[in-house]
Image (cartoon, grey):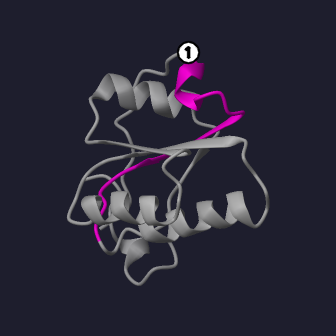
Amino acid sequence: MGRSAPDLSRFLQQPPDDSLRHGKRYLLAYLGVMGPQDGVDYALRALKLLRDNLARDDFHCIFMGAGDSYDDMVALSSQLGLDDVIAFPGRAPDEYVQRCLSTADVCLSPAFGRRGGNLCASQR
């Protein structure tokens, strides 16, 4: 297996939608499955460190997708106190994905470094 990406014949870059930033300077985005192997828990813990230990409050993050760990990741985000900087829209329509990815300053791929993460597709 290899990593996947949006089909460029269907992906149309959109003008940035600053409302997705929720008043923050930077938008971070994740698109993919949320399973135990996908590393979303690592990303959430890293975002907590970014905000709390490095005093960065200039970002908003959108995690698009679903999967076996979706509910656990939403709960972990709340436990980490990240509800104010993270949105979990679930499986998103193409138009929303295009707007998010066209606006994002950073796209997250937290599965790398996790056993099998470099062999799994982020988007299925």
Give the vertical position of 33 relative to 19 (above or below): below
* Most foreground residue, 2 or 22: 22
Residue 21 included in the magenta stretch of the image: yes
Q: Position of residue 1 (x, y in %)?
A: 29, 68
Residue 83: x %, y % from top left: 48, 49
Q: Position of residue 73 (x, y in %)?
A: 36, 62
Amino acid type, residue under disc 1 in the picture: Pro
Q: Is residue 121 left or right of residue 59?
A: left
Is residue 106 placed above or below 82 in the rendered structure? above
Query: What is the secondary structure assignment of the residue under circle 1?
Result: loop
Displayed quadrant of residue 18: top right
Residue 108 showing in the rendered view = yes
Query: Residue, x 59% and y 30% (percent of image)?
Result: 21
The residue at 58%/29% (across/down) is 22
Tell me how many marks there are.
1
- First to last magenta residue range: 15-35
Residue of label 1: 15
Q: Residue furthest right?
A: 54
In the displayed structure, would residue 8 be above or below residue 2? Answer: above
Q: Is residue 19 left or right of residue 66?
A: right
